[in-house]
Amino acid sequence: MCIEISDRIISTMDKQHTQTTIYINAYRSFLREEGQMSIDQIERLYKDMKPSIHNHAGDDTVDVEALMYSSLRLPPEIYHIENIILAQIDDSFHREGYDIGSWGEVHAPARRRKMYFDGTTKLAAFINSVTDLDDMVGLLIAFQIEWNKIHGKLTESGVIIDKSHGDEIKLALGVDDENWERLHRIWGEKIYQMLVEMQKHKVNFEVKLLRGHYVDYKKAAQRWFENIIENTRYKNLRKKPLYFVSSNTHSLVNNLTGWVTNLESELIKYLKDTNSEQLLSYWKEIEKGEHDGSRENFLWYILKKYETAHPEVKAQRIAHEVELGIDFISAEHYLDINAQVFSVQDMKKTGLAQKIGLNIDGLESDALVLNIDYPLGSGAYMVLSTILHNVNDLRGAYILGKASFLHANLGDIGLPTKVFDTYSKNTFIFTNAFTKEYFKAFRSGSVLTNQKVVSTKGTFLHPEPVIQKYFIEGYTLVEMEDGPYLNALYETTHFDRYPEETVVTMLNTPIDIGIIHYASDTPFTKAITLGTRNLGYEGVEATYVSSLAILRRIVEMEM
């Protein structure tokens, strides 16, 4: 019986792989050959693919999870927009007559991407790699399908859209209380305003790709790197020994400075003033010693919210970081990836030694650390490949990022030693620089070693049967960047460009390789995905303890 079920899954998986390939080839062909397309042209192919994050794409049920996921990764102005113009470099926009310098910059709550709105119906978006293209197309399709479903239901019912008719609206949409709350989380107080817009009109996006050549992706990455050189005090970055870290631009540096501890009373007062009951309950547990998390890490989480209302505090924090030798380089055009550069030697000025339990007074190093916000998918290859072409001595590459864990709890940590890359179909076997020993202080979750990772092409590009097949084969983490990063590292440890459909052994490399993931969603064990909720505070401890492990590893390498 098990064999029959397995064979059925494999057969279904092969079919879904084919549907996915047809869908990808269709919109890439439209955009490459015609230069533009209507989202309507590929909706049917998208529905045939049956993406796991959009279970109800092909039926009449309002898929709030897919709507929530796409809405949070598109700008709030998206329902005004009819034309989306995509390019890798600003030269392409200007060459085609789009004066995006006069447009307003807009942002998505949960996706870093440089986007500009002309104030009427046009959106210009920079894409960093082919993964960005895949992602943008998927987001637009999911949003259009669900918006238009809701439009149809609200129009057919004729329900009056206001707060007093909430029950009738829920009935018209066919959503339960839980999904109604999710809609509130997307739009907050603007929910009825948005529902009015949905009742009034459908959306139909037209997408235009300006060039989309591999060379332009490389140009964008090179100009991004040059922007870093121009805006850091470390002008000799190319010649210095370098440690590359792909993570975020808060946890690594926050672990170094410890600056937030001086604001404890101010931050707790802020929680009380804003009636943040859930966070105050965490704080009470911390005060009593009943919470597994760190006092300092909790304060850093609150500070992020506090700085939004108090920009002067953010300015003070940045000034302190500058004094310690930490440069923050904000992304301009091209890749929307912020960066930080600091010296290993300057770690002695901080309180790091006490945190990692090592005496670093004798640390003498001329190495630098380049820490970046993690890119999306194949953009990771472009970024690291560009860095490798520009620096002389990369000593370590450390990757910290979210992943979907197929068996874990939110906030757990996974340490992989095997990665299957769906881009190149390479399987990488490598020695992970990080072991359980680096996470002794981690008490709020589990540390899972020797994990197997699948690097997928995108959140909308893995149908559930495919994920089930990987799970059966022992792959436990699903993410998007490990494979592209390892492809780039292959090219600096071997004589040729990265291969395809090859088992690549990287057990003894001149570059120290470390990969850490923390569980951002658990779709199989807890049915929690990033479409149903954001990770929130559960990811704080895993993020900070992992960043501390990276700092400790760099110190160990240089001692």
Image: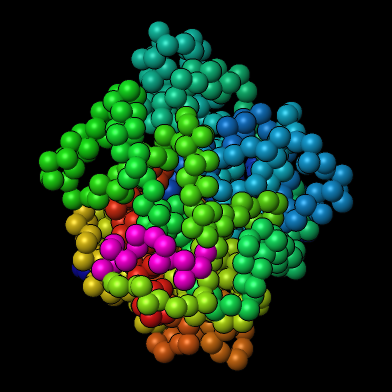
* Nearer to us in this view, 287 or 48: 287
The x and y percentages for residue 474 are 30, 72
Residue at the extreme bottom: 495
Characterize the magenta stretch by its predominant secondary structure.
helix
How many numbered discs sit on the rendered protein?
A: 0
Q: Residue at x 18, y 50 (%)?
A: 292
Q: Residue at x 51, y 47 (%)?
A: 318
Whether residue 73 is visible, yes or no, is yes
Answer above or below: position of 368 versus 341: below
Q: How is the image coloured?
A: rainbow
The x and y percentages for residue 276 are 30, 28
Q: Residue 98 falls in which quadrant of the image? A: top right
Q: Residue at x 75, y 68 (%)?
A: 215
Answer above or below: position of 128 versus 496: above
Answer above or below: position of 23 versus 147: below
The x and y percentages for residue 383 are 60, 67
Q: Residue 305 falls in which quadrant of the image? A: top left
Asked if residue 394 is among those painted magenta in the image, a careful observer would answer no
* Nearer to us in this view, 148 or 437: 437
- In the image, the segment drawn in magenta is 342-357
Whether residue 449 is visible, yes or no, is no
| Left or right of 511 in this view: 258 | left
| Left or right of 542 in this view: 289 | left
Q: Residue at x 34, y 32 (%)?
A: 266
The x and y percentages for residue 211 are 78, 58
Quadrant where the N terminus lies? bottom left
* Nearer to us in this view, 386 or 134: 386
